[in-house]
Amino acid sequence: MQRNDSSRTVVVAGGTDGMRRATAVARIERGDTVVVVGRNAEKGARLTELAERLGATDRFAFVQADLSSIAAVRKVIRYVGEAHPVVDALVLTANRQNLKRAESAEGIESTLSLYYLSRYLLGHGFAEQFDAAADPVIINVAGPGIKAGSVAWDDLQLRGRYTTMRAQLQAGRANDLLAVAFAENPSSRAKYVLYHPGFTRTDAINQFNQPLRALVKAYAKVGAKSVADSAAPMIRWIENPPAERLTVDDRGKPVDLNLKTFDQGDASRLVGVTEELLKGR
Ligand SMILES: NC(=O)c1ccc[n+]([C@@H]2O[C@H](COP(=O)([O-])OP(=O)(O)OC[C@H]3O[C@@H](n4cnc5c(N)ncnc54)[C@H](OP(=O)(O)O)[C@@H]3O)[C@@H](O)[C@H]2O)c1
């Protein structure tokens, strides 16, 4: 496949599987240069083989990294940023349900580190490369506007009381606030899209324990969206970024930005707490 003038450079963080993989492959097929960052070398090798079959060897790179580690994320930003002075689109999707509380290499609660901190660092880390692009966009795939849960300001690391759900809801809320803070005080010209794909038949289902896994799988067969359907809006946003600084989309519908989950005060507070957390790490 030939590269054309409208081709873009797309970085997909956590993109070896599911809707991100579908987005990466669709963009390769459109002639873009695609960098997929993922943890799983085997899945990375399979994507590399697919890129070869699509005639895109020189337009595809797999970068192996554990995105729950701050040091690894910073290394990715340096490495990818040096190789690609222009980044048109960044897709943020890495997440994992940790059944038991775990900590990252830097001693931060793992869900917070992977699902929120990596996205904070990557979104700001490519500022120079976004500003070199014609119409840059960041697509953060999460669960915006969920009213349940909160940021545990007094115990951000959930040392006192950890549950998988509490950690997911906290990091999800942190992503709502990250988007608000980015739009309010942008580090680049990138437009920010916060996207709720809805229940999708991805590998995430396998992270549940039995018997819940069997139940969720059975429900997913009838009640969940296909990976292709969930990936479609992402592929379009890369092609045509929204005009607005911040777009929050829940399964095709705009989300009310007056919801408490997008509170400006909380967003500024989280920036301060995050910078404090990153200090010296
Ligand atoms: N699926 C849904 O129904 C649904 C609904 C609403 C919102 N969402 C949100 O959409 C996003 C994607 O969800 P999904 O269902 O597609 O999840 P998924 O299938 O579990 O995929 C998560 C991705 O993150 C990667 N990843 C996990 N840990 C990593 C690490 N330490 N370093 C680098 N990459 C890592 C995985 O790579 P490996 O395969 O290498 O581990 C995988 O590619 C999440 O933020 C989720 O909250 C999903």
Image (cartoon, grey):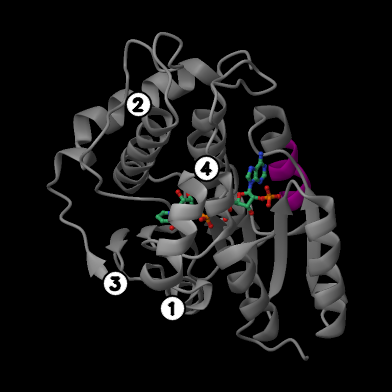
Mark 3 or mark 1, whichever is nearer to me: 3
Mark 1 or mark 4, whichever is nearer to me: 4
Instruction: First in sequence, mark 2 or 1: give its number.
Output: 1
Q: Amino acid at mark 4?
A: Arg
For label 3, count other residues whose C-alpha is less than 10 Å away and answer few (under 14), some (14-19) or many (20+).
Answer: few
Q: Label 4 vs label 2: CA separation?
A: 14 Å
Which region shows up in magenta?
A: 75-82
* Residue assigned mark 4: 119
* Residue assigned mark 2: 270
Circles 1 and 4 in contact, beta carbons < 8 Å: no
Left or right: residue 150 versus residue 23 is: left
- Which residue appears farthest toward the front when viewing the image? 211
Q: Label 2 vs label 3: CA separation?
A: 28 Å
Q: Residue at x 36, y 58 (%)?
A: 196
Q: Amino acid at mark 3?
A: Gly
Mark 4 or mark 3, whichever is nearer to me: 3
Q: Amino acid at mark 1?
A: Asn
Give how far across and how far down residue 8 sits, in percent. Answer: 63, 74
Q: Residue at x 78, y 59 (%)?
A: 43
SS assignment at label 1 = loop
Instruction: First in sequence, mark 2 or 3: give its number.
Output: 3
Residue 244 is covered by the magenta coloring = no
For label 1, count other residues whose C-alpha is less than 10 Å away and answer few (under 14), some (14-19) or many (20+).
Answer: few
For label 2, count other residues whose C-alpha is less than 10 Å away and answer few (under 14), some (14-19) or many (20+).
Answer: some
Q: Between residues 202 and 267, which one lies in front from this camera angle?
A: 202
Q: Amino acid at mark 2?
A: Leu
Left or right: residue 215 versus residue 251 is: right
Q: Label 3 vs label 1: CA separation?
A: 15 Å
What number is the disc on residue 252?
3
Q: Can residue 140 be seen in the rendering of this structure?
A: no
* Residue assigned mark 1: 240
Q: Label 1 vs label 4: CA separation?
A: 22 Å
